[in-house]
Amino acid sequence: MTGFLIVIASLYMLRSFIQRFWEWLTGTVNTGRLTDTAGGEPVACSRLNSTLTPVSVNYHFTRRCNYKCGFCFHTAKTSFVLPLDEAKRGLKALRDAGMEKVNFSGGEPFLEDRGHYVGDLVTYCKRDLRLPSVSIVSNGSLIKESWFEKYGEYLDILAVSCDSFDPETNQLIGRQQGGKSHLNSLLRVRDWCYKYKVAFKLNTVVNTYNKDEDMTGYVTALKPCRWKVFQCLVLEGENAGEDALRDAGKFVVSDEVFQDFLSRHKEVPSLVPESNEKMQNSYLILDEYMRFLDCRDGSKRPSKSLLDVGVQQALDFSGFDEKMFLARGGRYKWSKADMRLEW
């Protein structure tokens, strides 16, 4: 009987050794079930050594904003901003993991330290990390020419969000601060982009207030390198639900209405449409704690911070749809050196 038990134990040890050797050889790890930090629920995780490369990352380092857009889906639920050195540490880890493009967003990126925080990150990513593409999405209202003088050479693309060329519509949407003209800010920033050789991009969210507007002439005159047109997106806990700071219900448009808007503007050469289907899971989104946000269930479930667990393990909980990212044209000529723009 003793000899039989010894044989069984030996076979078990051999099986365990073979399994560990196979995992080492293939780079896979059977992790069983891990705990999701968003709700404490165990979730399946098939690989720690993920093959996913974070080529393009959107870092929402702040949630604070001076505008009150009614459909905003990344609202000011916290005022936290990472210390600059910690943010740089995370960005270097992402670069080492394969990141080629970083987009800084919010909230409003130019609120923090009057734009110097995002300016320092832009400089670090382009000059020190040598990323091919560094971009910012802003409402444009807080940007000054002195910022371009100091940081413009390190920025590839500056996108300004504008949902209407009618001041009253912008007021209804909440895309302005007090009596300050959003359209004046837009035009001013666009001129500075051309002066300081930064590619100018335009973002528009189609909603119930602008769905019938014809922007063809205005967008054509602005000559953005890309005009991203989004369908208004609802995310639980951000712009819908009991814990939300916004209620986007009255802004939502149907797929048919969105397609009508696109058809009306089909002659604009820079038009890049993104429906909810294309948009929701095809972005790698980092929040203010450097946690990837999984939007697959219509909300935002955060991973653990990549500063704590590393890039690859955090990516396992990102919910990122790489195929949709490529299908929607997520990779393009995103370095201003390759765009051959006429300044």
Image (spheres, grey):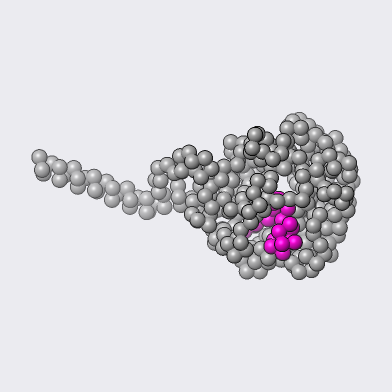
**Residue 331: in sight, yes or no?**
no
- Check residue 107 for magenta coloring: yes
Residue in front for this viewpoint, 226 or 149: 149
x then y, percent, for residue 210: 83, 38
The image shows a total of numbered marks equal to 0
At horizontal 87% and vertical 51% (from top left) the residue drawn is 180
Compared with 192, 43 (above or below) is: above
Position of 180 with respect to 122 (left or right) is right
From which residue to which does the magenta span run?
Answer: 100-119
Compared with 278, 124 (above or below) is: below
Q: Quadrant of the N terminus?
A: top left
x then y, percent, for residue 57: 62, 53
x then y, percent, for residue 167: 89, 44
At horizontal 68% and vertical 47% (from top left) the residue drawn is 76
**Residue 118: in sight, yes or no?**
yes
Residue in front for this viewpoint, 268 or 139: 139
Residue in front for this viewpoint, 218 or 177: 177
Q: Quadrant of the C terminus?
A: bottom right
Dividing the picture into quarters, in which one does residue 206 lie? top right
Position of 83 with respect to 250 (left or right) is left
- Check residue 94 for magenta coloring: no
Position of 264 with respect to 137 (left or right) is right
At horizontal 78% and vertical 37% (from top left) the residue drawn is 207
x then y, percent, for residue 204: 78, 44
At horizontal 62% and vertical 63% (from top left) the residue drawn is 84
Residue in front for this viewpoint, 318 or 340: 318
